[in-house]
Amino acid sequence: MKKAKDILNPVNLTRMVVALAILLTLIAIFLVVTRRAPALDSRRASDTCTSVVVVASGDTLSKLLLEQGLTHNDVDAIAKTLKKDAGISTLRADSDKIEFTRQTDNAPVSKIVVIPSPWKQVELTCDEAGAWNCKTVDIERDTRAVYRAGEILDGDSFYLAGNRAGIPAGILADVYDLLAFEMDFERDVRAGQKFWVVYEENFSDGKKIDNGRVLAVSFDALRGNVKMYRYRKSDGTTGYYDADGNGAIKSLKRTPINNAKVTSSFSNKRKHPVLGYTRAHKGVDFRASTGTPIPAAGAGRVIARGYNRGHGNYIKLRHNGSYETLYAHLSRFVKNVKVGTNVRQGQTIGYVGSTGMSTGPHLHYEIIKDGKHVNPMTVKLPAISNLDKKEKKNFTEYRKLMDDAIEELKKNQNLFIQL
């Protein structure tokens, strides 16, 4: 290493100044070149022509591609590539979009972008050999958690109150499905009850695209406050849990059909509307119009499907070693749901009707526990899964953070949590 006094002598200073001047000149030339390059790229990009087609009813991929001047060989190759590499075999009307890019107005299509959702697009390009290559691009989401609160007024339903609070219909339906495990919206909703929901809103380029998932919900039900939090476990799976970390999603739902009015409750003594004498009513009746889909109250296996004088068309599911459910007075069954079929929770198994001893269209719903009929509205239902000790500790920390954030959102509902 040279000493400082040697570096600072006149000869060395001159050499350093010359070297520095040369270096600055090279840097200036480099900057000019790099600044010009994007300008050329921008000019070339602006020369390309892009048209967007929104898929309409009756449109097919083949039809749209041929209209853009592609050959039948290209159409066949593109269809095979989309199915193989992107899992796209059909187009959805009024939903999917396709972008076509050409170098000039009269040039052949050089790039195709299929847009099946706001968060995904599939890019197809043709190489020099004429082969079409496919690449899937995920669009980054700007996800925000928002808070909305409401109160049940006289004559309100939960949906009316939720709509007034500014909660989107899809989010209300999700909340209904969650709370239906713990409460009956026909019998448990009263004026003065308060509720709040925290849910996701998804944005792209500052514009809201859609809603995401429910993150937390609270409802002041007759049996006490019902609160649920969405939580991701260490293994990556997610679920809903109460404030103590116990599974909030039960193995069965109390009310299979959303928004259905209870017309007859569970009772050991009820005057039968057809027979005219008093006998036990071993289930709950829900009024619904003929043809309303009936979802399975829980995951299970079909153990009976048929017709008898009292129940008319009925179907019976076994959910585990203890619980069974029965659905009666169906107008018809779902064709592929037969004895021995495994069904998931929420899967349609039949349709409301008025077969058997019935005075009008409705669903008769029963829960049988250990061979004995129980009241669907009051029976304590088992949770699907609870958190273990370690997960409960992590959940408690997460819940506290969420509760603190919710308190801030309560003070100003115009705020949001950036996720």
Image: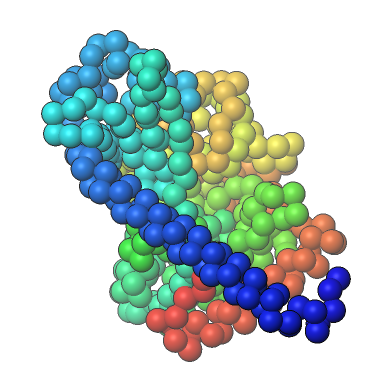
Question: Could you say which is closer to the camera, residue 124 or residue 40?
Answer: 40
x and y percentages locating residue 408 in the rendered image: 54, 85
Q: Is residue 238 left or right of residue 297?
A: right
Q: Is residue 73 left or right of residue 413?
A: left
x and y percentages locating residue 22 in the rendered image: 54, 64
x and y percentages locating residue 348 in the rendered image: 44, 35
State whether residue 2 appears in this view. yes
Q: Is residue 254 above or below residue 76?
A: below
Task: Indicate the quadrant containing the C terminus: top left, top right, bottom left or bottom right.
Answer: bottom right
Q: Is residue 258 above or below residue 24?
A: above
- Residue drawn at 84 percent across, 61 percent down: 390
Within the image, what quadrant is residue 12 found in? bottom right
Question: Could you say which is closer to the camera, residue 410 or residue 314?
Answer: 410
- Residue drawn at 49 percent across, 84 percent down: 410
Question: Could you say which is closer to the camera, residue 220 or residue 21?
Answer: 21
Question: Could you say which is closer to the camera, residue 196 or residue 7?
Answer: 7
- Residue drawn at 51 percent across, 21 percent down: 338
Task: Indicate the quadrant containing the N terminus: top left, top right, bottom left or bottom right.
Answer: bottom right
- Residue drawn at 22 percent across, 19 percent down: 70
